[in-house]
Amino acid sequence: MPPDPKNLLDALTGELDRTYREVAQRFPNNPAVRFETVDGKEELILTPLDRLDEPPSLLQLRAEVSARLPRIDLPELLLEIAIKTNLADAFTHLTERKARVADLNTSLCAVLMAEACNTGPEPFIRYDIPALRRDRLSWVKQNYLRDDTLTEANARLVAAQNKLALAHAWGGGEVASADGMRLVVPGTRTTNRTEAHTDYDRHRRL
């Protein structure tokens, strides 16, 4: 984006105005658009597009893809990824850098899920499982979740994803989409954990 937004805003304003006028001019000759009175109010009615039949090849592809994507709970997926990437190693204790407790993976994943979903710990508390007790989750959040550990964890995930052929098939990582916004970012493909740190920090600042 340019530092001075005036020219860009003027261009967008002109484009919107031209498009509006072109659409309005086509209304009288467009059989798919009409105005009707509904409950005493004039409403714009758009005729839906005709439905296209799905070809057999698409139905077969959908069935094969579904068979390869079993339905699982999101926490189970997070636990599996944490184990495969050694994600817990990125989280160190606040004061005792090498401190480790039993089933730390389970506690960390529960805390991360609670934070990511903005639900708080309540949905993940299980008093019959020591790693999911309220006091354990609170202790893990206070001592293991920090900016530096989250940055390290994200870098590990980026580095692991970069090893997947499917990730490369979607591009070089210069374009990101979040909440419907398309973001183009500078950078190179992540080939090691150090570069993953650099790329993630750059994206985080943006």
Image (tube, rainbow, N blue to C red):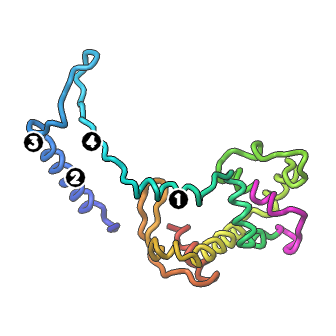
The magenta segment: 93-110
Find numbered disc 3 in the image and state the secondary structure of the residue it sits on: helix
* Label located before the other in sequence (3 or 1): 3
- Asked if residue 107 is among those painted magenta in the image, a careful observer would answer yes
Mark 3 residue crowding within 10 angstroms, few (<14) / some (14–19) / many (20+): few
* Residue that label 3 marks: 25
Residue beneath the point at 24% across and 56% down: 12
Q: Where on the picture, by quarter, is residue 45?
A: top left
How far apart marks 3 and 4 lie (CA) works out to 21 Å
Q: What residue type is labelled 2?
A: Thr
Give the foreground label among 4 and 2: 4
Where residue 88 appears, x then y in whole percent? 77, 68
* Place of residue 64 in the rendered image (x, y in percent of width and height, measured from the top left): 53, 59
Q: Name the residue under label 1.
A: 64
Residue type for callout 4:
Leu
Residue position for label 2: 13
Q: Earlier in the sequence, mark 4 or mark 1?
A: 4
N-term mark: 3 or 2: 2
Residue 27, compared with residue 54, is above or below; it is: above
The disc, 3 or 4, on the residue closer to the chain's N-terminal end is 3
Residue 125 within the segment the image draws in magenta: no
For marks 3 and 1, give the one nearer the viewer. 1
Left or right side of 122 for 196: left
Residue at 44 percent across and 74 percent down: it is 171
Q: Is mark 2 on a helix, strand or loop?
A: helix
Report helix, strand or loop for mark 1: helix
Residue matched to label 4: 49
Q: In the rendered view of the protein, which quadrant contains the N terminus?
A: bottom left
SS at circle 4: loop
Q: Quadrant of residue 160?
A: bottom right
